[in-house]
Amino acid sequence: MTNLLDLSTPAKRFRLVAIWEAITWLALLIAMFFKWVLGYEEAIRIPGMVHGVAGFMLFVVVALATAWSLKWDLKTTFLALVSSVPPFGTIVFERWAVRTGRLGELSDSAARETEPALS
């Protein structure tokens, strides 16, 4: 397993930001519960801003930078950007990108972990 805070490559930066975007989505969903169910009108102000700026916008910038660095085609880039819309979509996309070889060395290490050992 790779160190989550290792940001030495575009793929590793993408993974961290994808997870961060999902965490901010979770915080926003919890805040929405407090606003709409429990009636705390101000509950979404801070989580909404954190998700919008530090989650969504950061993810879009990092996804575009990763697409450029790893030479993703338009379809993969589009899927990465769309994955930021539904809650936890960035995690689903990141797992898919690792499995399909689109995240550089993260995909290489995943392939090595699933290969049977040669004796």
Image: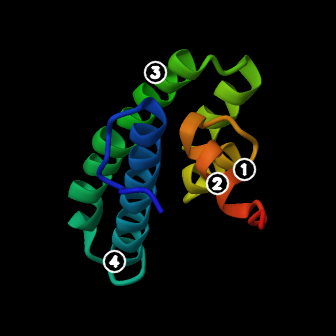
Eyeballing the image, is 37 above or below 73? Answer: below
Badge nearest the viewer, 2 or 1? 2
* Residue at position x 50%, y 26% in the image: 66
- How far apart in space, not on screen, are marks 4 and 1 (Cα)? 37 Å
Q: Quadrant of the C terminus?
A: bottom right
Look at 41% across and 76% down and name the residue there. Answer: 33
User: Do the residues bearing badges 2 and 4 touch, measured as CB atoms within 8 Å?
Assistant: no
Q: Amino acid at mark 2?
A: Ala
Q: Residue, x 26% and y 47% (percent of image)? A: 49
Applied colour scheme: rainbow
Question: Which amino acid type is marked by label 3?
Answer: Ala
Q: Which residue corresponds to mark 4? A: 34
| CB within 8 Å, label 2 to label 1 | yes
From mark 2 to mark 3, how far is it between C-alphas?
A: 22 Å
Looking at the image, is mark 1 or mark 3 earlier in the sequence?
3
Task: Give the CA distance from mark 3 to mark 4.
Answer: 35 Å
Q: Residues within 10 Å of mark 2 (few under 14, many from 20)?
A: some
Using the image as rendered, state which of residue 72 and residue 84 is in the foreground.
72
Disc 2 marks which residue? Answer: 110
- Residue bearing mark 3: 65
Q: What x and y, as percent, mark residue 104?
A: 59, 34
